[in-house]
Amino acid sequence: MAEPENGRIPLNSSHSAGITIRAWREEDFPAIQEISSGEGWLTPKVRPSEAFLAWERSYPALVAVHEGEVIGFLRALTDGEVTTYVAELAVVPRFRRQGIGRALIEACHRLCPHTRLDVLLIGSADAFYEATGFHPCRGYRKSPDQGPRADGACPSDQCQPVGQP
């Protein structure tokens, strides 16, 4: 796995001037919590200790910063040789469609260049991932706090059956 030079991975200036991608730091966690909450991802606020440990134990764990403000992040897990799993990727709404999400993915892949990137996503993000070169792949999720529902439906409002819009 490659290490970022000085902890910083500069964003290609043709995407968005003044935005830097770097390794996350402890002081970024409140912004990560807020961005996550804005996406409806409650774990960082509801289980902050566990979420913080997840960030500490993840690699690559990156943030996009504009004028000192964290405006996006990517948290991944890798074995360094075969697979890098992108667990979370978010960009605040006012900075979307400027190449920041793509730059976070590219920075992640530069840090783990020999691996494939896998991601589990919600349906509303399909177009973004397809535009960045991902292809659909069936998957499953089981959360410790969510058992199966009696009607067989996914216990999370964010899950959608494969092939559904």
Image (cartoon, rainbow, N blue to C red):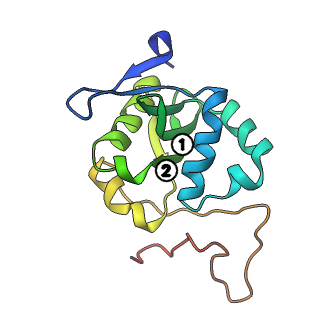
**Which labelled disc corresponds to residue 119?**
2
Compare residues 4 and 140 and report the one nearer the observer: 4
**Residue 14 image position (x, y, % from top left):** 20, 30
For residue 55, say whether it is visible: yes
Q: Is residue 150 left or right of residue 134?
A: right
Compare residues 101 and 165 and report the one nearer the observer: 101
Rendered-image quadrant of the C terminus: bottom left
Q: Is residue 44 left or right of residue 71?
A: right
Tell me: residue 34, above or below residue 12: below
Which residue corresponds to the image point at 69% horizontal and 49% vertical from the top-left?
44
For the residues labelled 1 and 2, say whether their Cβ atoms are less than 8 Å apart: yes
> Disc 1 designates what residue?
85
**Residue 2 image position (x, y, % from top left):** 48, 17
**Residue 151 image position (x, y, % from top left):** 68, 89
Which residue corresponds to the image point at 52% horizontal and 37% vertical from the top-left?
83
Q: Rounded to the nearest whole Å, what is the CA distance between mark 1 and mark 2?
A: 6 Å
Identify residue type, mark 2: Val
Quarter of image, res 135:
bottom left
Quarter of image, res 41:
bottom right
For residue 2, say whether it is visible: no
**Residue 29 image position (x, y, % from top left):** 64, 37
